[in-house]
Amino acid sequence: PIPVIIDCDTGVDDALALLFAVRHPGIDLRAVTCVAGNTDVDGVVRNTLTVLEQAGAPDIPVGRGAARPLIEPARSAQHVHGADGMGDLGLPAPKRTASELDAVALLRREILASPRPVTLIPTAPLTNIALLLRTHPEVTRNIERIVFMGGAVGSGNATPVAEFNVWHDPEAAAILLTAGVPITMYGLDVFMQVVVDTPDVHRLRASADPGTRLAGDLLAHRPTAIGEEPEAEEAGGLGDAGAVCAVADPGGLTTRLLPVEVSLDAGPTRGQTVVDRRPRAGEYEIHEGSRERALVDVALEVDVERYVKLYLETVEAASRT
Ligand code: BDR
Ligand code: CA
């Protein structure tokens, strides 16, 4: 199996990602690290520990990370993910607490201790990952690649042009993109497409297995998009879990290696991932100066049916064993 660490802000769809990672036989989830995003970092830790217990994986180490972005104050997304940051499902409090190691220390230990290079899957603001890369740059020698949920080629969600995870900590995202390790951007363009049908959600909710039932309850949660009527958005989105599907089954994703830059401006583009899709970008170099832009494997298309099937089969198969 592929050694994986997920850095998350659990989070309705982060929880879906954790459930899938724990149950996929091709993934060896070695640790989970937490960062402020959808809710405050202590809420994220609590939600993460609860999800891992419900999924039957209570021993995976969980590290508490950054309580706020590098520069900006913390801003939660409780309007989308509920007061507890995870859909207000009334889940029990976790039985254990987080690791004594903080997120950066845990990431460093697990990456360097892994016999095979680790795949990192950040599904949250990139604060922990930026701190790791700046504090312990030697970890890159044992990182296979980083597949992050964040950014967008087209429309944003936190602002017209910026996706939430990148917008929440743009400086951290910029540090990630220039880290010199292979990076795949699983952005909003594909993220929004992978949706489970209602009858499947009902079947999961009726399962006797707590982990499967939790996946169904999370999928039934209707996110409320900023500025929209409550419950305007469709339920059933796999969200962050799609990025883990992309690691388990890369063939379901069409990507292209493209220059990407994060806008760090104070104005309306702050947090935008500017993706250069021009066929002959070099022609205009003279106007742009000679600064180097990171080449990122950007997800452009996703096989929705393939990932929905993979998700359901993985989560439900584990409940039958
Ligand atoms: C991202 O923001 C969070 O609210 C979700 O968990 C996801 O990681 C989508 O923009
Ligand atoms: Ca998330």
Image (cartoon, grey):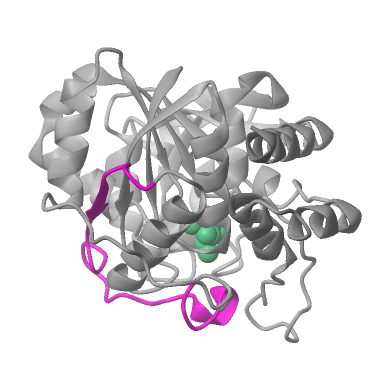
Res. 192 in view:
yes
Q: Nearer the viewer, residue 174 or 100?
A: 100
- Residue 123 position (above or below residue 232): above
Res. 276 in view:
no
Q: Where residue 304 sits: x, y (%)?
A: 79, 37
- Residue 26 position (above or below residue 204): above
Residue located 52% across and 55% down the image: 15
Residue located 18% across and 52% down the image: 99
- Residue stretch rendered in magenta on the structure: 58-85
Task: Reply yes or no: does residue 69 show up in magenta.
Answer: yes
Task: Reply yes or no: does residue 55 show up in magenta.
Answer: no
In the picture, measured across the screen, residue 131 lies left or right of residue 227, that is left
In the picture, measured across the screen, residue 115 lies left or right of residue 13, that is left
Q: Quadrant of the C terminus?
A: top right
Residue located 40% across and 58% down the image: 48
Secondary structure, magenta segment, majority class: loop
